[in-house]
Image: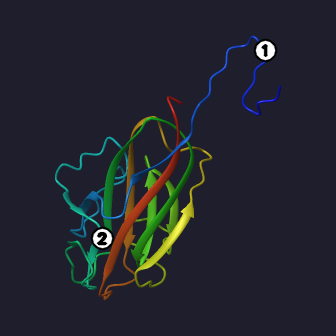
Amino acid sequence: ETGGGLSDVSDAPFTISPVMRIRPIVKGDTWKYEDSGLDPGPAWNTLGFDDSAWASGAGQFGYGDLDEQTVLTRTYPSQTAVYFRKKINLSGAVSFASLRVLFDDGVAVFVNGTQVYSYNVPNTAHAKYATASEENREETAELSLSPNPFVHGENIIGVIVKQNGRTSPDLSFDLSLEVDVTPGGH
């Protein structure tokens, strides 16, 4: 009789781990942000950083395009960077991660302090501008998980959105994240 299902002829213990694809961040989610133009320091994208003084709002973020849910401060000259932070909880080990990010002009994304993606931002130093201009560009990217920056439990997603120059008239940001999680995995 062939059932075509799972079979095990050994006496060894085994487990079946279902992999779940989840979206811990969707477009329009709430993020903490720092838009003053000041440098928040090197630890801004780590879990231990105190962001209690940062404002919070819902995406889309930005200014200058009239399509923003949360209008950010425009500085003169245009700030080099605006910083975003969002905590997510994961119930297991991540085996796949993909992000979809909307930005103007450049972006760099971090997971628990590890940079996992950038576009037009070869240098994440606070004083540096993006290397090119983009108008509400949207990019999808599969993230490298070697080494895997995600942990079981609390994670921090940090994002820098950079302007391309002192006179840049607009800024945009929103992001969604999709991951495959094996529950209980470490």
Q: Is residue 155 above or below residue 41?
A: above
Q: Residue at x 35, y 49 (%)?
A: 43
Q: Residue at x 25, y 66 (%)?
A: 38
The type of residue carrying mark 1 is Ser
Residue position marked by numbered label 2 in the rendering: 60
Secondary structure, mark 2, is loop
Of the residues under marks 1 and 2, which one precedes in the sequence? 1
Q: Is residue 25 above or below residue 80?
A: above
**Left or right of residue 59: residue 175:** right
- The label number, if any, that marks residue 10 in the structure image: 1
**Left or right of residue 70: residue 109:** right
Q: Residue at x 44, y 85 (%)?
A: 133
Q: Residue furthest top?
A: 11
Residue 142, image x and y in percent? Answer: 58, 59
The type of residue carrying mark 2 is Gln
The N terminus - image quarter: top right
The quarter of the picture where residue 65 lies is: bottom left
The quarter of the picture where residue 110 lies is: bottom left
- Mark-to-mark CA distance, 1 and 2: 54 Å
Residue 148, image x and y in percent? Answer: 56, 44
Q: Judge depth for marks 1 and 2 and give the one in front.
A: 1
**Closer to the camera, 100 or 114?**
100
Secondary structure, mark 1, is loop
